Amino acid sequence: MKIKHQLAIFNALTRLLLILILWLMLPILVEKVVYRHINNSLVEKEKKFIDHLNRNEINDFIENTADSTDTYSQFSTLHSEFLVLSRAAAKPTQKKTTFSNDYRVIEGEDNEYRILRHFFTYENQGYQLEIGSSISEIKDLTFIIRFFIIIVFVVVLLITFLADTFYIEYLLKPFYKIIDTKIRRVNEPEAFDHTPIKAASRDFRELDFVLNQMMDRIAELFKKEKQFISNVSHELLTPIALLKNKFENLLQNDSLDDNAVDKIAGSLRTLDMLKKIINNLLLISRIENNQYATDEEIHFGEMVTDMQEDLQDRIEDRGLSFTNTMQHNFSFKGNKTLIHILIYNLITNAIKYNRENGGIIISDGFQDDQYFISIADSGIGMDVFQIEKIFNRFTRISSDQEGQGLGLAIAKSIASFHHIEINVTSIINEGTTFVLSFPETAKPN
């Protein structure tokens, strides 16, 4: 998951947590505010009632009451408020005024009320005054507010999530540009783009500057390493040529016995092998240094047919069958010599590691609109660990076979130079298949 999405999700989860906390605390906050308002209203009504209370009103009420409860009651027409006055014995520890929530049945209707209870003495007689205000509407209002706020919060959450995503993407745009232009597309230090990235953030400007400095150092070291390999290889060829020339001159001496001739011939073979290794290393170095042109027209069908004729003796010596089923005459822009070496090394590899009287099949085709050439053999095969190492330099599949282990390393370098993908599949004792997938620039004739 990209960092912009992680940051947007983190911000959304943080807001969601805050929304959940506010949503849970909302009833408490509403009730505190509303209850404070109701309490103040009930206190005002209680003061107003007591201030206007007199003995005549109480006596009239007691004389006219039809029961013996000694209670004066008054209700609103909608049962939203009630007032009850009753005689009560005064208690020393009793609080003068209290507030509570309680259910009352008024004219057959059960409602919850916020009730003020006030105890007072009038002309040495104790009374209890109860004034209630309905809170059922407050419960309904709280539910509506919670429902409305949760909708608002969800809308705000979606809007802020989208806003964060776009804003974070805007902030990280220089970062992704640095990755795309200065890291992902750079295969060689020489191809590195030193153009400064425009960024509003100082952090990304600093990152761009440090990357430029780092790539300058890498390019310098890379250049020195390539130059060193090239110089050493050239310097080694000179003494090898001198030694070979001296050994060849020694062979012309008739006084040498057969034992000495065999030793000199063995030394010459060793020098030839060493010279071949150095030339292969030089070839890899030149390929990696991009010292070859890639503007030649290459026809794969003709190339494979010519190779079959050149390798016919080696194929017959092993008793192998060589089947060329290529049907597409495709052309490709590249270096003809290098492509010839690439396919030649793969075919000779199929001959070398094949079994007696085995077979080699060369085929081509298209997969996902991409041209490919397949080179399959019926040889000894490889396991997964061998496949992982076959393109490493000086790696050989079998110690029984001759070679320096550079053929597939060269093939890999040539393929990378031409942006060709090499895929390998192999089964032990059944065979190996190399598939060259060419870039989309390959065009039919």
Image: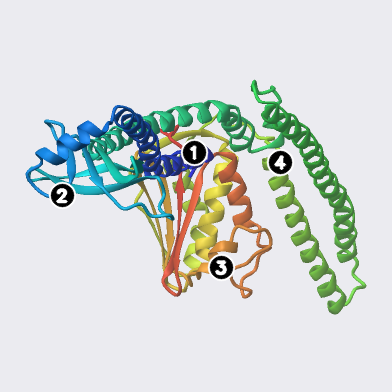
Extreme right residue here? 255
Q: Earlier in the sequence, mark 3 or mark 2?
A: 2
Q: CA distance from mark 3 to mark 1?
A: 48 Å
Badge 3: few (under 14), some or many (20 or more) residues near its Cα, within 10 Å? some
Please tell me the numbered disc located at residue 62. none
Q: CA distance from mark 4 to mark 3?
A: 27 Å
Residue for point 89% across, 60% down:
249
Quadrant placement of the C terminus: top left
Q: Earlier in the sequence, mark 1 or mark 2?
A: 1
The correct choice, above or below, for 177 with respect to 267 in the image is above
In percent of width and height, residue 4 lies at 51, 36
Q: Earlier in the sequence, mark 4 or mark 3?
A: 4
Please tell me the numbered disc located at residue 11. 1
Q: Which residue is mark 4?
A: 286
Question: Would you say the residues marked 3 and 2 are in contact, meaning their CB atoms lie under 8 Å apart?
Answer: no
In percent of width and height, residue 93 lies at 43, 55
Please tell me the numbered disc located at residue 69. 2
